[in-house]
Image: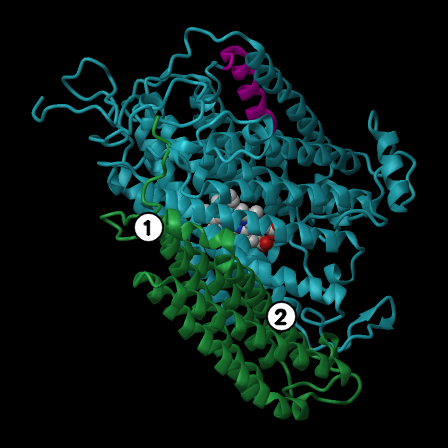
Amino acid sequence: MSNKEHHEESFWTKYVFSIDHKVIGIQYGITALFFLLIGFSLMMVMRWQLAYPDTAIPIVGPFIKWLATLNGFASEGNLPSDLYNVFGAMHGTIMIFLGVVPLIVGAFGNYLVPLQVGAPDMAFPKLNMASYWSYLPGGIIMIISFFLPGGAANSGWTAYPPLSDIATQGQTWWLVAMIFLISSSLLGSVNIIVTIVQLRVKGLTWMKLPFFVWSQLITSFLLLLAFPPLEVAAIFQLMDRIAGTSFFLPSGLVISGEMLQVSGGGSPLLWQHLFWFLAHPEVYVLILPGMGVIAEVIANNTRKPLWGYKSLVYSSFFLGFMSFTVWAHHMFLTGMGQGMSTFFQITTMIISVPSVVILSCFMLSLWGGSIRFNVPMLFALGWIPMFGVGGLTGLPLGLSTSDIHLHDTYYVIGHFHYVVAPGTIFALFSGIYFWFPKVTGKMLDETLGKIHFFASFVFMNGVFFPMFIQGLAGVSRRLADGGASYAHAADVLKWNETMSYSAWLLGLAQIPFIVNLIWTLYKDKDSKANANPWNATTIEWTDATSPPLGHGNFKKTPVVYNGPYEYSVPGMKDDFLPQTKKIKKGK
Amino acid sequence: MDIKIPYNEDLRPDTGLYNAKLGIWLFLASEVMLFGGLFSSYILLRAGASVWPPIGLDGQSVAHLLEETIGLATFNTVALITSSVTMVMSWVSLKMKDISKFKMYMWITISCAIIFLIVKYFEYSHKIHEGFIPAHDTYMALYFTMTGLHVLHIIGGLFVLVYFVMPDGIKMWDDEPIRFTNRIEVFGLYWHFVDLVWIFLFPVLYLLN
Ligand code: HEM
Ligand SMILES: [Cu+2]
């Protein structure tokens, strides 16, 4: 991109096929929020079936009946179990691959990384556009597959064979969509890494990078290296389904009393290895950038430097590296053998150390700060204990002995939702409230934001905490009736209603948020949202052109002199020292 | 407002790289993981088989056919290695500002790639004709998937190669010669990688049976 191409842009090149990282970031953001809403709606419907099995669903019942009939399932406005399986598989897929990751990497990474390193754009703007336009078709394919005979994919987000090999055609669409999504994140991650390594402005040395940038760098490496093996697995499964191969089909497989006419000789466990080789690093893809957001918000609102910046950076590195060595802790019960279990149990215990270091750094950062309790900070403060619960409940899962009891129960569902929902999603909310004025030039309303936070905080716990109770009692995950026909579940079944009501109320709690977004966008530009409303130090607030940002980021290429978290520097008039402000030594 | 992206052509002093070069190395790292996944799967499936290549439902094994095709595969190995050498030569020619030599070497590279694909076509159709389709057994499944993905890499590369010698691609040499030379260097890295993958595929699929 050179200056001479700087001409009037048409609507299409400006808003649709834009190569400006800010526009692409916003595109990612809107699309991903939309998918989050879809994924969440699926769950709200499923929660009815779990609380009141096989009864007609209020409000959306007719729609479910229509969809079920289209798919070829019988429904009287209730959620038939076949469709329950579809919804479950697609809830997980949509939330992770179409919602959270595109939001936290595609939107936040794209918008903020170039600004925070002082770059005019991403290193490869056209690839950046290609990455969005590979993500969107992937999403559209997933959505269309809901309307196929047999419905969308129904073998869980983990798509375990042999089941997925012989599942209805929705699974094929799922695989094709996944290949689009994988390509998209490969392009995106190369771009982010090159941008950080090559486009840092003068003076912005490694240890002066905001922690958010570090988290994006490590995340991108995880995406880059962990996704290809899943691509291999997806191609194998496509071959199994389309070309009749037996990559994942063992010899002598009998289905509905009949021997399957395939060559056999394959291994269902091969899928699990390839899948978890991606999917464990993927959980750190979900959480690391969230930690990056939390770090920025905490430092800014305690008005003091982040405690243990270097420990945070080194811990994230270690976390990223170790995340490639723990995948089979998802497979303790597959009979893979004692030696393997022991190895993966040890690595899993080791990997929890850096997570604890990071959490401790955040908690210690609060010590002695004069905390501003604004909405971004509330979400950040809510994140800390919630992630703590999620992380601590992972430990019993990582020990193969206790995992025998806990594997595939609601306890696991509770564990990972604590890390992802009040974990990553709270970090996302925190980030949205924090950077919204940068993107639009307008501050989101504090009161609506506080209602959003407190209601979400309460109901998140209402949804997920009872899962631990049910799981410890032995209720399996993925039961279409929520355990109603499962004798051991009788004592804990009553929690289903609590969880379902919490889920619907959690849905209601998002209304102030949506209203806030739309209402604020239509409001006139307010005076409070100047270029740096939070008095922050990093480049995107202090040097980028005033919001909303137009084409190009900086009037003058910035030069960096200071670390990212120079708050309350003794002897200075302001309580924040921008990264780009030069001060004389000794003052 | 300065919107030119730095280090598109020149090297960043502290990393010693221009952007696209780092980009291609990262991309190749992901490719290593892709083929790494394929080779690991090969090992796992082979370790689980009692005979290799396995016997299909028709009681046949592809072993005898493989013997016959070793010659063709060897020929293809030579074709690809040659193309790698000429790829380097075309880059060197650009460095020496000799555009006609550049074109000549590029066309040799393109021809080698086409020869590779033609030979592959005959190999595939021969196997399929004899009933050794991907569904026949796990060896055939791996064979078609692994070489198929490799062939896709060759086809993709071929399009880019042809683009570079077409008027549309080569006109960059007049406007931005350094950038064009960088492009050829970066593409060359990709091409060597595709070549290298074949160097692994050849013994694994043809010789070690
Ligand atoms: C901090 C230390 C952590 C440990 C020791 C840990 C351990 C585990 C183990 C052993 C399992 C498998 C349980 C089973 O299937 O029986 C599991 C499942 C899971 N974990 Fe964690 N985990 C940790 C953190 C995280 C984080 C940070 C995330 C995401 C942001 C996460 C997301 C998940 C997910 C999504 C699953 C379930 C996947 C599925 O089966 O569908 N975990 N965890
Ligand atoms: Cu894991």
Answer yes or no: are tags 1 and 2 on the same subunit: yes
Q: Quadrant of residue B124?
A: bottom right
Q: Colour of chain A?
A: cyan
Residue at image position (57%, 82%) is B205
Where does label 1 land, which residue? B18
Where are the magenta residues, as a range?
A: A444-459
Whether residue A303 is situated above or below residue A133 in the rendered picture: above
Residue A145 within the segment the image draws in magenta:
no
Q: Chain of mark 1?
A: B
Where does label 2 land, which residue? B148
Whether residue B108 is situated above or below residue A386 in the rendered picture: below
Whether residue B132 is situated above or below residue A353 in the rendered picture: below
Position in image of residue A241 (x %, y %): 75, 64
- Specify the farthest residue to the front: B100
Residue at image position (59%, 86%) is B72
Residue at image position (34%, 47%) is A315
